[in-house]
Amino acid sequence: MFEKRKRQLGVGGAVITPLHKRYVMQVLRSGRLSYGPFLKAFEAKFAELHNRRFAISANSGTSALQVALHALKELDGWRDGDEVLVPAMTFIATSNVVIQNRLKPVFVDIDPRTYHIDPKDIEKRITPRTRAIMPVHLFGVSADMQAIKQIAKRHKLRIIEDACQTAAVSHRGEPVGSEGDIACFSTYIAHIVTTGVGGMALTNDQGIALKMRSLVNHGRDNIYISADDDKGLTGKKLTEVMSRRFNFVSVGYSYRLTELEGALGLAEIKNISGNIAVRQKNAKLLLALLKPYEKYLQLPWWPEHSGHAFMMFPIVVTTKRFTRDELARWLEERNVETRPFYSLLGQPVYRRLFGEYAAKRYPIADWTQKNGLFVGCHVELKSKDIKYIGNVFKEFFKGKKLQ
């Protein structure tokens, strides 16, 4: 007999371990909350995990993306109205930061299986004003970076990887987020590495790193970013720091993290392999439980050369026998939380900015966002929870007489 769960099974979550608590207590006992040793160590470990030289922490993945574009616009001399290619289905922050930098987002349709920006559609959208491609690594797996890099090289375009939903997995033997000019990650609560709020920008270019570090700190002169930067100095060196430490060289932002997020992030990095393994185990079980319904559902697919971190478990309804919203309502009424795929150009603000029917120009993205939803497979969920989700689907199809 099917019995409804009392506790909602959410789309995201985190596990707070004794190590998280110990590191946070060390910060509190130290009395140091501003940028310091924990946050610096978190940046270093995050960069190492993704095979990058430089890491710049920020207060969100969105802030990291905004600063990344701002840095390239300033360093490369882009003009207002220059274009950045973005997928036509992604979380709205991806394209918002383009607009906020007074640049123009140019949308590109997506691949129907991976839901990533479609390389075959990219070159059709390039114009003389195109300056960058912003691929998004959705749901825990990489976009097709090999093809994207080839296009960028041919057209001399920058690449900013939006890796907010994907971390700590590989793509063709390289860490996701290690192939563009800049890669940006989110450490928000539902993401792969969790600090509550937060983000990270990674690059191998020292000049870009210095500019992003400055922008995160109000556009400040990099000679003085941390309270430790004048410690132990004397003579001419101290005088130089004193004369420049309140100089501002760009119109920047207050996008800083604290030592508390650094402590949580350092604990997350130490647990990352185990956390990814739990997500993959949950996804494997859910794939097996939902396989009988492949006639009606498109389940997650990814190429053999890519790892999958399974930030969430995406599903697309491929039949006309029932709708995505019917399935979502059934799941929600039985305490399985869902989210619809990202309706980007269908959002009220984007309908005003880009036209009421703009979404129709990107048929794959339009179809996918209308028929897609995702459920959780995160580290808080146990095998019994995944089996419960499988049973909720089973009861749905039984009621529809589609088994």
Image (cartoon, helix red, strand yellow):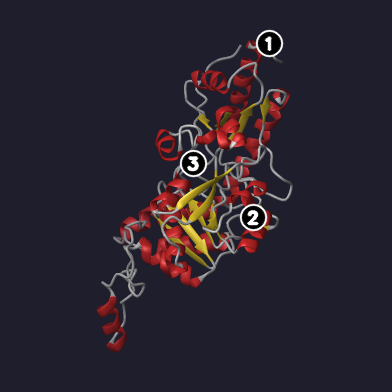
Residue lying at 61% horizontally and 61% vertically, measured from the top left: 155
Which residue position holds label 2? 148
How many other residues sit within 10 Å of disc 1, few (<14), some (14-19) or many (≥20)? few
Secondary-structure class at tag 1: loop
Amino acid type, callout 3: Phe
Residue 4 point in image, percent of width and height: 53, 17
**Residue 153 visible in the current orientation:** yes
Residue lying at 45% horizontally and 58% vertically, measured from the top left: 69
Which residue position holds label 1? 401
Query: On the rendered image, what quadrant is the C terminus found in?
Result: top right
Mark 2 vs mark 3: give the one in front: 2
Question: Which label's residue is closer to the chain start, 1 or 2?
Answer: 2
Secondary-structure class at tag 2: helix
- Residue 298 sits above or below residue 137 on the image: above
Which residue position holds label 3? 91
Residue 349 point in image, percent of width and height: 40, 37
